[in-house]
Amino acid sequence: MVPEVISPNVPTEPRSVLPGIAVTLGELVQAEEALQRLIEVKLPAKQAYHVAKLVRLIKAETQHYHAQREEAIRDLGDATADGLEVRVPPDKMPEFLKRLNELFSVETRIDWPPLALADLPDITPGDLLRLGSLVKE
């Protein structure tokens, strides 16, 4: 029998888990526009990495919303006269909004810490509201 050897350089306790962000899909969709503006601002390297990774994780989550929204438009919509667009007619709008609201209420978790308010560049109050729980004080 070979004795178990633990190297002094290997931690014996589990690594700390990054604090995540519990949000709804709707909150993420509403934050997308503000995040797009934020990702275009020049930031110090560490902050830029934090923002870029958060945006990548959020895009992976909101992809499902956008795909389902497009599917609902195809299912409930009618082609315009020129055939270039599909629009949901007023009589089918309640069903369309019901589907979107169901998607908006889906709870998810982003396994990455929120942005620190102190690390953000100048930002509009509107964008701060859109970012919601993606920002902490």
Image (cartoon, grey):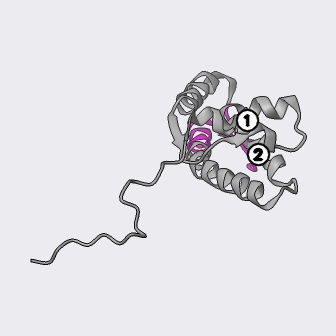
Q: Percent position (x, y) of residue 80? A: 74, 41
State left or right for residue 124 relative to residue 55. right
Q: Percent position (x, y) of residue 57? A: 60, 52
Query: Magenta segment range?
Result: 68-88
Q: Earlier in the sequence, mark 2 or mark 1?
A: 2
Q: Is residue 30 above or below residue 4?
A: above
Residue count near mark 1 (Cα–Cα under 10 Å), binned few <14, some 14–19, many ≥20: many
Q: Are marks 2 and 1 in contact (CB under 8 Å)?
A: yes
Q: Which disc, if any, is residue 131?
A: 1
Taking depth in this image into account, of 76 and 137 the one nearest to the observer is: 137
- The residue shown at (59%, 49%) is 63
For disc 2, the marked residue is 35
Image quadrant containing the N terminus:
bottom left
Residue type, numbered disc 2: Leu
Picture quadrant where residue 70 is located = top right
- The residue shown at (51%, 38%) is 108
Residue type, numbered disc 1: Leu
Image quadrant containing the C terminus:
top right
- Decide whether residue 71 is among the magenta residues: yes
Q: Is residue 48 above or below residue 127?
A: below
Residue count near mark 2 (Cα–Cα under 10 Å), binned few <14, some 14–19, many ≥20: many
Taking depth in this image into account, of 93 and 42 the one nearest to the observer is: 42
Q: Percent position (x, y) of residue 131? A: 73, 35
Look at the numbered disc 1 and give the secondary structure of its residue.
helix
- The residue shown at (67%, 38%) is 134
Q: Measure the alpha-carbon separation of dots 2 and 1.
A: 7 Å
- The residue shown at (82%, 48%) is 38
Task: Pick out the residue farthest to the front.
Answer: 8
Taking depth in this image into account, of 96 and 4 the one nearest to the observer is: 4
Q: Percent position (x, y) of residue 113? A: 61, 44
- Decide whether residue 72 is among the magenta residues: yes
Taking depth in this image into account, of 54 and 3 the one nearest to the observer is: 3
